[in-house]
Amino acid sequence: MVGLFKQPKRRLKKLLRDGEYTDAIVFGKNLESEYSDDSDFMFIMGSIYFIVDDAKNALPYFEKSFQLNSEDVEMLTLKTNVHLSLQQKDEAIDCCKRIIKLEPKNYEAQSLLDQLENI
């Protein structure tokens, strides 16, 4: 059990897996300054906020994760969904285009892009 506390990201993921979202947010907030340049940490924090339907708080974490690693398709997919829930169509279109550039056969992103461009 001691290992979990030596590896805070692992503990954060465990809280997330266990559905302990409030505890995960509090724990993550305490780690934030230490992991501010860790795209994986930022992705996890954004995901927690996304799961609890708090797109407004999720977005800065996905933005930071994107700055640190702009080629993470999973992060870009969640970032797209956050933009959609915030009704930010142009930003969602941009994310879809980035996903397609990384994965030309990503039909989900292509389909969503087609829908968004025809609204």
Image (tube, rainbow, N blue to C red):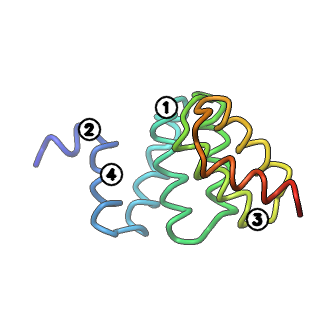
Secondary structure of the residue carrying tag 4 is helix
Asked if the residue at tag 2 contacts the one at tag 3, i.e. Cβ–Cβ closer than 8 Å, the answer is: no
Marks 4/2: CA–CA distance: 10 Å
Q: Check the image and report above or below for 20 versus 31.
A: below
Q: Which residue bears the numbered disc 1?
A: 38
The numbered disc on residue 7 is 2
Marks 3/1: CA–CA distance: 25 Å
Q: Nearer the viewer, mark 3 or mark 2?
A: 3
Marks 3/2: CA–CA distance: 33 Å
Decide which of 82, 105 is in the foreground and name it. 105
What is the three-letter code of the residue carrying label 4? Lys
Secondary structure of the residue carrying tag 2 is loop
Marks 1/2: CA–CA distance: 14 Å
Q: Residue at x 39, y 60 (%)?
A: 24
Of labels 1 and 2, earlier in sequence is 2
Q: Which residue bears the numbered disc 4?
A: 13
Asked if the residue at tag 2 contacts the one at tag 4, i.e. Cβ–Cβ closer than 8 Å, the answer is: no
- Residue 75 % position (x, y): 55, 43
Secondary structure of the residue carrying tag 3 is loop
Secondary structure of the residue carrying tag 1 is loop
What is the three-letter code of the residue carrying label 2? Gln
The numbered disc on residue 93 is none
Of labels 4 and 2, earlier in sequence is 2
